[in-house]
Amino acid sequence: MRCFVAVVPPADALEDLDAFLDVRRASGDFRWTPEDQIHLTLAFCEEVADRHLDELLERLERAAARRTRFATRIAGGGAFPNVSDARVLWAGLELDEDARTEVGRLADGCRAAASRTGIAVAGQRFRPHLTVARVRRPTEMTPWVRLLDAYAGPPWTADSISLVQSHLGEGPRNRPRYQVLAELPLGPSDAGAAHPDGSG
């Protein structure tokens, strides 16, 4: 199966970004990412064998438990591979120094979890971003990047990661269909925490 590990922004953050982009979409010949498919990819695995899934989930759960929740918001943006000759338009995340370190370590932990399970991980250098649109031909995107640079959405706290299976061609207009296989909380489990009355 084709899978990725991601931080998925909450619905209100995605709705705010969607409303900001919606009135401007007609002026660009882009393939826009559906609102419910926008996410921060931490690790991408093109082929995951069924026999590896349980071990992968266990390792991802441990990787998530070692990290802490972090505050952020969708803000700013950019283009890949560069603004003047771009194929991908992306929105950024506003992160303070501690949160940026935490996100980097979270991505490293998720990639290591897959690798140690015996799953090949795409090797691009991690750069936090949320893909909002793609183009078929290299395009000058300076106006769009400037537009996103003026955007800052509502604040939210990243408190979990998701393992998502991507079913190619099964979504509307031949897009992928995403299926969340598991949602794993960041930070240690509260299972062993003491109760307010001192028990447990």
Image (cartoon, rainbow, N blue to C red):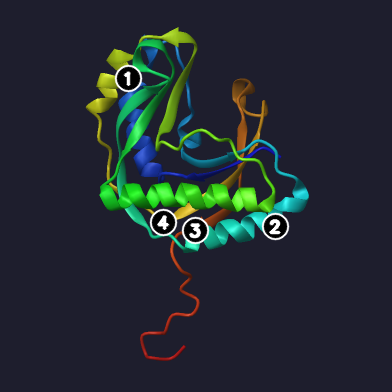
**In the image: residue 44, left or right of residue 192:** right
Between discs 2 and 1, the one toward the N terminus: 1
In this rendering, is residue 17 above or below 185? above
Report how far apart the C-alphas of labels 4 and 2 lie in the structure.
22 Å
In this figure, which residue is indicated by the disc labeled 2?
A: 54
Report how far apart the C-alphas of labels 4 and 1 lie in the structure.
31 Å
Between discs 1 and 3, the one toward the N terminus: 1
The amino acid pointed to by label 1 is Val
Q: Dividing the picture into quarters, in which one does residue 81 lie?
A: top left
Q: Quadrant of the N terminus?
A: top right
**Quick check: marks 4 and 3 in contact, CB under 8 Å?**
no
Between discs 3 and 2, the one toward the N terminus: 2
In this rendering, is residue 187 above or below 150? below
Residue 49 position, x and y percent, is 75, 45
Secondary element at image label 4: loop
**In the image: residue 91, left or right of residue 172:** left
Which numbered circle lies on residue 63?
none
Q: Closer to us: mark 4 or mark 3?
A: 3
Dot 1: few (<14), some (14–19), or many (≥20) neighbours within 10 Å?
few
The amino acid pointed to by label 2 is Asp
Residue 111 position, x and y percent, is 55, 47
In this figure, which residue is indicated by the disc labeled 3?
A: 64
Secondary element at image label 3: helix
Residue situated in front as seen by the camera: 72 or 154: 72
The amino acid pointed to by label 3 is Ala
Residue 90 position, x and y percent, is 39, 27
Residue situated in front as seen by the camera: 88 or 172: 88
Which numbered circle lies on residue 159?
4
